[in-house]
Image: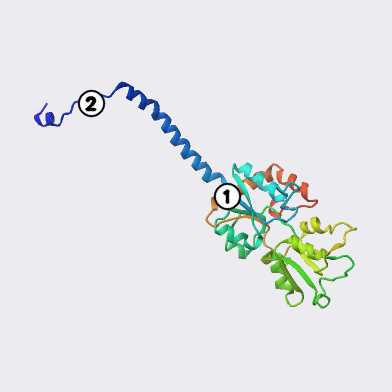
């Protein structure tokens, strides 16, 4: 050995045998704990999804007698989360603030009969459409209102839910003819029609069936004119789940889950529990 190497030589330090054993026993435990913590954190970040709904909006979403959230879209959302292995949390949010709440990260998705429209597509990312429900005019039975006769409509009041496609349609087509009254919820629209504070309501057809019994000949309310789903520039391409623009992976996850519930008949099974007509958009038939 050269002198220089001799100068650098240090004899090994004796390590107590018990210390070696302790380190060997603890190290795997620490490694496993850290790995589990990293996995738990990763799963939590990936799986926990907060979904906003506007309640009440029967039969899509409402509170049952026990105060729990129920309805077609609640059942659908739970099925989607189960398929996608997401840990989902429902968040009740009024319609007026539902998109701002999404963009400010109060929740991660909206599943609340939101139509895909050009204006909304500038703000959020949509999944493929999962449903297509028409809109209808509703009046008191015996009112003899002709929705196509602008002269007889002059001065009549109509209720719509604020910020909806119904609001947009009535504002664009009837602003100079009807007295448009805007409400926070569809339930409030129905209530004021029932209380005779409105002459007309323009609402979602399923809501008209559920809250005003327009298909019942003994009901005090009737549908006026045909069901309406056009123009697409106002009513869009169907109801879809909305997420933030950057959350393309979450949108893709929901799309895969939607494909799954359609493929095995789950969607139709849920639909038939709440509706006696076909809600599927043309792309799903």
Name the foreground residue: 84 vs 29. 29
Q: Give me the C-alpha separation between circle 2 and circle 1.
A: 58 Å
Neighbours of disc 1 within 10 Å: few (<14), some (14-19), many (20+): some
Q: Which residue is mark 1?
A: 252
Q: Residue at x 64, y 57 (%)?
A: 93
Residue 188: x %, y % from top left: 75, 62
Neighbours of disc 2 within 10 Å: few (<14), some (14-19), many (20+): few
Quadrant of residue 261 in the image?
top right
Name the foreground residue: 203 vs 232. 203
Quadrant of residue 164 in the image?
bottom right
Q: Residue at x 81, y 72 (%)?
A: 148
For the N terminus, the image quarter is top left
Q: Which residue is mark 2?
A: 13
Residue 19 in view here: yes
Q: Residue at x 53, y 45 (%)?
A: 46
Determine whether the residue tagged by mark 2 lies in a helix, strand or loop: loop
Residue 92: x %, y % from top left: 65, 54
Looking at marks 2 and 1 on the same chain, the residue that comes earlier in the sequence is marked by 2
Q: Give the number of marks.
A: 2
Residue 165: x %, y % from top left: 69, 64
Colour setting: rainbow
Q: Residue at x 49, y 42 (%)?
A: 41
Q: Is residue 285 left or right of residue 6?
A: right
Query: Cβ–Cβ below 8 Å for labels 2 and 1?
Result: no
Determine whether the residue tagged by mark 1 lies in a helix, strand or loop: helix
Q: Which mark is residue 217?
A: none
Residue 42: x %, y % from top left: 49, 42
As displayed, is residue 143 above or below residue 237?
below
Quadrant of residue 15 in the image?
top left
Name the foreground residue: 212 vs 252. 212
Q: Is residue 140 left or right of residue 256?
A: right
């Amino acid at each position: 050995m050269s002198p220089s190497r001799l100068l650098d030589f240090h004899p090994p330090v004796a390590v107590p045998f018990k210390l070696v054993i302790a380190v060997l026993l603890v190290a795997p435990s620490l490694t496993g704990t850290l790995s589990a913590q990293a996995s738990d954190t990763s799963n939590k970040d990936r799986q926990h999804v907060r979904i906003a709904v506007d309640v009440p909006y029967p039969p899509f979403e409402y509170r049952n007698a026990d105060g729990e959230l129920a309805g077609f879209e609640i059942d659908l959302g739970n099925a989607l989360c189960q398929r996608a292995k997401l840990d989902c949390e429902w968040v009740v949010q009024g319609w007026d603030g539902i998109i701002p709440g999404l963009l400010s990260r109060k929740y991660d998705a909206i599943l609340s009969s939101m139509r895909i429209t050009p204006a909304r597509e500038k703000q959020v990312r949509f999944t493929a459409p999962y449903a297509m429900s028409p809109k209808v005019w509703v009046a008191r039975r015996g009112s003899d209102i002709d929705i196509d006769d602008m002269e007889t409509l002059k001065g009549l009041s109509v209720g719509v839910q604020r910020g909806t496609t119904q609001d947009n349609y009535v504002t664009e087509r009837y602003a100079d003819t009807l007295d448009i009254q805007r409400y926070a919820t569809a339930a409030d629209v129905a209530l004021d029609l029932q209380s005779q504070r409105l002459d007309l309501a323009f609402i979602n057809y399923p809501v008209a069936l559920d809250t005003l019994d327009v298909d019942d000949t003994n009901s005090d309310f009737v549908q006026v004119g045909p069901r309406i789903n056009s123009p697409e520039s106002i009513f869009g391409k169907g109801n879809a789940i909305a997420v933030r623009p950057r959350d393309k992976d979450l949108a893709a996850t929901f799309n895969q889950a939607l494909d799954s519930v359609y493929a095995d008949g789950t969607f139709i099974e849920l639909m038939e529990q709440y509706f006696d007509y076909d809600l599927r958009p043309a792309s799903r038939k």
